[in-house]
Image (spheres, rainbow, N blue to C red):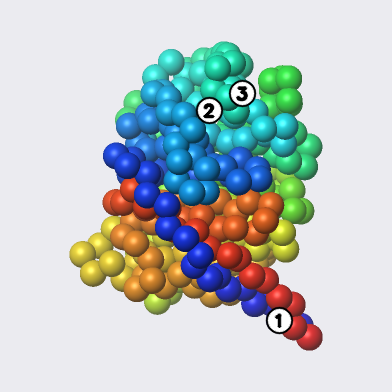
Amino acid sequence: MTDSSSIRKVNEITIEHLNIAHLSALEPDRFLASDDWGNLIQSDMKGSILWKKSTNMYGIRGRHSVTSEGQILYTDFNINAIYTMGSDMFSNKLAIRTGNWKPGAIYSSHINEHVLVGMEKNNFMEVTAKIVRFSKGWTKLQDINLNDKGQNLYLSARFITENINCDICTSDYLASKVVVVTRTGEYRFSYYGHPRQIGFRPCGICTDAQGHIVVCNGYEDSTNQCSGVHLLDMDGQFLSFLLTPDQCPPIPCALCINNQQILMIASLASPTVSVYKYFHSTQV
Protein backbone atom coordinates (compact mmCIF):
# COMPACT_ATOMS: atom_id res chain seq x y z
CA MET A 1 0.00 0.00 0.00
CA THR A 2 1.36 3.45 -0.92
CA ASP A 3 0.22 6.94 -0.02
CA SER A 4 0.14 9.86 -2.39
CA SER A 5 -0.80 13.48 -1.86
CA SER A 6 -1.00 16.36 -4.28
CA ILE A 7 -2.23 19.93 -4.41
CA ARG A 8 -3.95 22.09 -7.00
CA LYS A 9 -3.74 25.85 -6.84
CA VAL A 10 -7.18 27.46 -6.66
CA ASN A 11 -6.56 31.05 -5.56
CA GLU A 12 -4.11 33.77 -4.55
CA ILE A 13 -4.90 36.29 -1.82
CA THR A 14 -2.85 39.47 -1.45
CA ILE A 15 -2.68 41.06 2.00
CA GLU A 16 -1.40 44.60 1.45
CA HIS A 17 1.64 45.70 3.48
CA LEU A 18 1.99 42.31 5.21
CA ASN A 19 4.88 39.96 4.48
CA ILE A 20 3.61 36.83 6.17
CA ALA A 21 5.40 34.84 8.88
CA HIS A 22 2.54 32.66 10.18
CA LEU A 23 -0.97 31.48 9.26
CA SER A 24 -3.77 29.94 11.32
CA ALA A 25 -7.08 28.62 9.96
CA LEU A 26 -10.32 30.03 11.34
CA GLU A 27 -13.15 27.74 10.31
CA PRO A 28 -14.90 27.62 7.99
CA ASP A 29 -13.71 30.32 5.60
CA ARG A 30 -11.41 32.75 7.39
CA PHE A 31 -7.79 32.80 8.49
CA LEU A 32 -5.29 34.70 10.60
CA ALA A 33 -2.02 36.05 9.20
CA SER A 34 0.84 37.80 10.95
CA ASP A 35 4.16 39.30 9.92
CA ASP A 36 7.43 39.55 11.87
CA TRP A 37 6.65 43.11 13.03
CA GLY A 38 3.65 42.32 15.23
CA ASN A 39 0.79 42.93 12.81
CA LEU A 40 -2.07 40.45 13.07
CA ILE A 41 -5.02 40.37 10.66
CA GLN A 42 -8.12 38.29 10.12
CA SER A 43 -9.15 37.81 6.49
CA ASP A 44 -11.79 35.93 4.56
CA MET A 45 -10.89 33.71 1.63
CA LYS A 46 -11.57 36.54 -0.81
CA GLY A 47 -8.86 38.69 0.79
CA SER A 48 -11.14 41.12 2.62
CA ILE A 49 -9.48 42.15 5.90
CA LEU A 50 -12.04 41.82 8.69
CA TRP A 51 -9.82 43.36 11.35
CA LYS A 52 -6.20 44.28 12.03
CA LYS A 53 -4.38 44.48 15.35
CA SER A 54 -0.91 45.58 16.40
CA THR A 55 0.77 43.18 18.86
CA ASN A 56 4.21 42.25 20.21
CA MET A 57 4.40 39.05 18.11
CA TYR A 58 7.81 39.87 16.69
CA GLY A 59 10.04 37.46 14.79
CA ILE A 60 9.59 34.41 12.58
CA ARG A 61 7.59 32.12 14.84
CA GLY A 62 4.18 30.49 15.00
CA ARG A 63 2.87 33.07 17.42
CA HIS A 64 -0.88 32.51 17.16
CA SER A 65 -3.30 29.61 17.17
CA VAL A 66 -7.05 29.00 17.25
CA THR A 67 -8.87 26.77 19.73
CA SER A 68 -11.61 24.33 18.74
CA GLU A 69 -14.09 26.93 20.05
CA GLY A 70 -12.70 29.66 17.80
CA GLN A 71 -10.79 31.56 20.47
CA ILE A 72 -7.52 33.14 19.33
CA LEU A 73 -4.34 32.63 21.35
CA TYR A 74 -1.18 34.67 20.80
CA THR A 75 2.16 35.21 22.52
CA ASP A 76 3.85 38.43 23.60
CA PHE A 77 7.64 38.18 23.35
CA ASN A 78 8.25 41.56 25.03
CA ILE A 79 6.56 40.98 28.37
CA ASN A 80 6.63 37.16 28.38
CA ALA A 81 2.88 36.63 28.30
CA ILE A 82 0.12 34.77 26.47
CA TYR A 83 -3.15 36.42 25.53
CA THR A 84 -6.57 35.14 24.52
CA MET A 85 -8.95 36.95 22.21
CA GLY A 86 -12.36 36.28 20.74
CA SER A 87 -12.63 35.98 16.97
CA ASP A 88 -14.29 39.43 17.01
CA MET A 89 -10.97 40.87 18.35
CA PHE A 90 -12.66 42.81 21.16
CA SER A 91 -12.32 40.45 24.13
CA ASN A 92 -8.53 40.67 24.53
CA LYS A 93 -7.39 39.17 27.86
CA LEU A 94 -4.14 38.19 29.57
CA ALA A 95 -4.11 34.39 30.04
CA ILE A 96 -0.76 33.80 31.78
CA ARG A 97 2.70 35.27 32.27
CA THR A 98 5.65 32.96 31.60
CA GLY A 99 8.26 34.34 34.01
CA ASN A 100 11.75 34.61 32.54
CA TRP A 101 10.88 32.32 29.61
CA LYS A 102 9.96 34.01 26.33
CA PRO A 103 6.92 32.40 24.69
CA GLY A 104 7.22 32.04 20.94
CA ALA A 105 5.29 29.36 19.08
CA ILE A 106 1.86 28.35 20.33
CA TYR A 107 -0.52 25.59 19.29
CA SER A 108 -3.99 24.75 20.60
CA SER A 109 -4.79 21.03 20.42
CA HIS A 110 -8.14 20.10 18.89
CA ILE A 111 -7.73 16.61 20.40
CA ASN A 112 -7.67 17.46 24.11
CA GLU A 113 -7.80 21.30 24.15
CA HIS A 114 -4.35 21.49 25.74
CA VAL A 115 -2.06 24.35 24.69
CA LEU A 116 1.55 23.73 23.61
CA VAL A 117 3.94 26.67 23.88
CA GLY A 118 7.52 26.85 22.61
CA MET A 119 9.63 28.89 25.03
CA GLU A 120 13.18 30.17 24.90
CA LYS A 121 15.60 31.66 27.44
CA ASN A 122 19.09 33.11 27.06
CA ASN A 123 21.60 31.78 29.60
CA PHE A 124 24.96 33.53 29.28
CA MET A 125 24.77 33.76 25.47
CA GLU A 126 23.37 30.23 25.18
CA VAL A 127 19.76 29.72 24.11
CA THR A 128 17.70 27.15 26.01
CA ALA A 129 14.38 25.99 24.57
CA LYS A 130 11.51 23.82 25.70
CA ILE A 131 7.85 23.07 25.04
CA VAL A 132 5.37 23.55 27.85
CA ARG A 133 1.96 21.90 27.91
CA PHE A 134 -0.89 23.79 29.59
CA SER A 135 -4.43 22.70 30.33
CA LYS A 136 -7.36 24.63 28.90
CA GLY A 137 -7.45 26.53 32.20
CA TRP A 138 -3.71 27.37 31.96
CA THR A 139 -2.47 24.93 34.56
CA LYS A 140 1.05 23.82 33.67
CA LEU A 141 1.02 20.08 32.94
CA GLN A 142 4.37 19.23 31.40
CA ASP A 143 7.83 20.46 30.41
CA ILE A 144 9.33 18.85 27.31
CA ASN A 145 13.02 19.62 26.89
CA LEU A 146 15.23 16.53 27.40
CA ASN A 147 15.64 13.16 25.71
CA ASP A 148 16.22 9.88 27.60
CA LYS A 149 19.95 10.66 27.76
CA GLY A 150 19.39 14.00 29.45
CA GLN A 151 20.29 15.97 26.33
CA ASN A 152 18.41 19.03 25.14
CA LEU A 153 15.80 18.21 22.52
CA TYR A 154 15.56 21.73 21.11
CA LEU A 155 17.78 24.63 20.23
CA SER A 156 14.68 26.60 19.27
CA ALA A 157 10.96 25.83 19.04
CA ARG A 158 9.78 28.20 16.32
CA PHE A 159 6.65 26.43 15.00
CA ILE A 160 4.59 23.67 16.66
CA THR A 161 1.78 21.34 15.59
CA GLU A 162 0.20 18.10 16.78
CA ASN A 163 -0.41 14.96 14.76
CA ILE A 164 -3.43 12.65 14.84
CA ASN A 165 -1.48 10.19 17.04
CA CYS A 166 -0.81 13.07 19.51
CA ASP A 167 2.85 13.39 18.47
CA ILE A 168 4.22 16.91 18.95
CA CYS A 169 6.01 18.12 15.81
CA THR A 170 8.33 21.12 16.14
CA SER A 171 10.29 23.16 13.63
CA ASP A 172 13.66 23.75 15.30
CA TYR A 173 14.83 26.51 12.99
CA LEU A 174 18.22 27.10 14.64
CA ALA A 175 19.10 23.39 14.69
CA SER A 176 17.89 22.91 11.09
CA LYS A 177 15.62 20.00 11.88
CA VAL A 178 12.07 18.93 12.67
CA VAL A 179 11.85 17.25 16.08
CA VAL A 180 8.98 14.87 16.87
CA VAL A 181 8.14 13.54 20.35
CA THR A 182 5.22 11.54 21.73
CA ARG A 183 2.50 13.18 23.80
CA THR A 184 4.46 12.18 26.93
CA GLY A 185 7.61 13.89 25.61
CA GLU A 186 9.48 10.76 24.54
CA TYR A 187 11.77 11.43 21.58
CA ARG A 188 10.69 9.72 18.35
CA PHE A 189 12.73 11.13 15.47
CA SER A 190 14.28 14.15 13.78
CA TYR A 191 14.03 15.13 10.12
CA TYR A 192 16.99 17.02 8.67
CA GLY A 193 15.66 17.83 5.21
CA HIS A 194 16.02 16.21 1.82
CA PRO A 195 19.59 15.23 0.78
CA ARG A 196 19.04 16.85 -2.61
CA GLN A 197 18.99 20.26 -0.92
CA ILE A 198 22.09 21.81 0.62
CA GLY A 199 20.20 23.67 3.34
CA PHE A 200 17.17 23.13 5.57
CA ARG A 201 15.50 25.76 7.75
CA PRO A 202 12.12 24.38 8.82
CA CYS A 203 9.46 27.02 9.38
CA GLY A 204 5.68 26.60 9.16
CA ILE A 205 4.51 23.08 9.99
CA CYS A 206 1.14 21.35 10.03
CA THR A 207 -0.37 17.87 9.70
CA ASP A 208 -3.19 16.49 7.56
CA ALA A 209 -6.11 14.19 8.31
CA GLN A 210 -4.00 11.10 7.50
CA GLY A 211 -1.15 12.03 9.86
CA HIS A 212 1.24 13.34 7.23
CA ILE A 213 3.58 16.14 8.28
CA VAL A 214 3.81 19.16 5.98
CA VAL A 215 6.71 21.56 6.54
CA CYS A 216 8.15 24.63 4.77
CA ASN A 217 11.85 24.84 4.03
CA GLY A 218 12.62 28.52 4.56
CA TYR A 219 16.33 28.24 3.81
CA GLU A 220 17.44 31.35 1.93
CA ASP A 221 20.00 31.04 -0.83
CA SER A 222 20.76 33.00 -3.99
CA THR A 223 19.53 30.26 -6.34
CA ASN A 224 16.25 29.57 -4.49
CA GLN A 225 16.91 25.83 -4.82
CA CYS A 226 16.54 25.07 -1.12
CA SER A 227 13.00 26.27 -0.56
CA GLY A 228 9.89 24.16 -1.09
CA VAL A 229 7.29 22.31 0.96
CA HIS A 230 8.13 18.80 2.19
CA LEU A 231 5.64 16.00 2.84
CA LEU A 232 6.59 13.37 5.45
CA ASP A 233 4.78 10.37 6.85
CA MET A 234 4.11 10.24 10.58
CA ASP A 235 7.36 8.31 11.11
CA GLY A 236 9.47 11.04 9.51
CA GLN A 237 10.07 9.44 6.11
CA PHE A 238 10.19 11.86 3.19
CA LEU A 239 7.36 11.19 0.75
CA SER A 240 7.51 14.03 -1.77
CA PHE A 241 7.87 17.73 -2.41
CA LEU A 242 4.35 19.13 -2.30
CA LEU A 243 5.93 22.22 -3.83
CA THR A 244 9.38 22.10 -5.42
CA PRO A 245 11.68 25.13 -5.19
CA ASP A 246 10.66 26.15 -8.71
CA GLN A 247 6.99 26.10 -7.74
CA CYS A 248 7.46 27.84 -4.42
CA PRO A 249 7.96 31.52 -3.57
CA PRO A 250 11.31 32.43 -1.97
CA ILE A 251 11.50 31.84 1.78
CA PRO A 252 8.21 29.96 2.30
CA CYS A 253 7.47 30.47 5.94
CA ALA A 254 3.82 29.94 6.82
CA LEU A 255 1.23 27.28 6.10
CA CYS A 256 -1.96 25.75 7.47
CA ILE A 257 -4.63 23.24 6.41
CA ASN A 258 -8.27 23.79 7.34
CA ASN A 259 -11.07 21.27 7.82
CA GLN A 260 -12.03 21.49 4.15
CA GLN A 261 -8.53 20.30 3.19
CA ILE A 262 -7.60 23.73 1.90
CA LEU A 263 -3.85 24.33 2.17
CA MET A 264 -2.61 27.91 2.48
CA ILE A 265 1.07 28.80 2.02
CA ALA A 266 2.75 32.19 2.38
CA SER A 267 6.23 33.67 2.16
CA LEU A 268 8.12 36.14 4.28
CA ALA A 269 9.17 37.77 1.01
CA SER A 270 5.64 38.39 -0.26
CA PRO A 271 2.18 39.63 0.84
CA THR A 272 0.51 36.85 -1.16
CA VAL A 273 -1.17 33.78 0.30
CA SER A 274 -1.33 30.90 -2.19
CA VAL A 275 -4.41 28.70 -1.74
CA TYR A 276 -4.47 25.04 -2.80
CA LYS A 277 -6.92 22.18 -2.73
CA TYR A 278 -5.16 19.36 -0.92
CA PHE A 279 -5.77 15.83 -2.20
CA HIS A 280 -4.85 12.56 -0.54
CA SER A 281 -5.36 9.02 -1.75
CA THR A 282 -4.36 5.58 -0.56
CA GLN A 283 -3.48 2.99 -3.19
CA VAL A 284 -3.18 -0.75 -2.59
Q: Nearer the viewer, residue 103 or 177?
A: 103
Residue hosting label 3: 86
Q: Which label's residue is closer to the chain start, 3 or 1?
A: 1
The residue drawn where x is 42% and y is 52% is 13
Mark identifier at residue 2: 1
Q: Residues within 10 Å of mark 1 (few under 14, many from 20)?
A: few
What residue sits right under mark 2 in the picture?
Answer: 74
Residue extending furthest bottom? 284
| Residue drawn at point x = 49 percent, y = 40 percent | 43
- Using the numbered discs, state the Cα–Cα distance from disc 2 to disc 3 in whole angstroms: 11 Å
**Mark 1 secondary-structure assignment:** strand
Q: Is residue 88 above or below residue 155?
A: above
Query: Of tags 2 and 3, which is closer to the observer?
Result: 3
Provide residue 126's location: percent of width, then percent of height: 37, 33
Q: Quadrant of residue 60?
A: top left
State the quadrant of the C terminus. bottom right
Percent from the top left, x then y, of residue 195? Answer: 43, 74
- As drawn, is 132 to the left or to the right of 124? right
Q: Quadrant of residue 210?
A: bottom right
Q: Residue furthest left?
A: 222
Q: Which of these two is toward me, 260 or 244?
A: 260
Task: Label 2, secondary structure: give it.
Answer: strand
The foreground one among 90 and 226 is 90
Name the residue located 65 percent from the left edge and 28 percent from the top edge. Answer: 71
Real-space Cα separation, disc 2 to disc 1, in angstroms: 38 Å
**Secondary structure state at the residue bearing disc 3:** loop
So how many labels did they put on this image? 3
Q: Amino acid at mark 1?
A: Thr
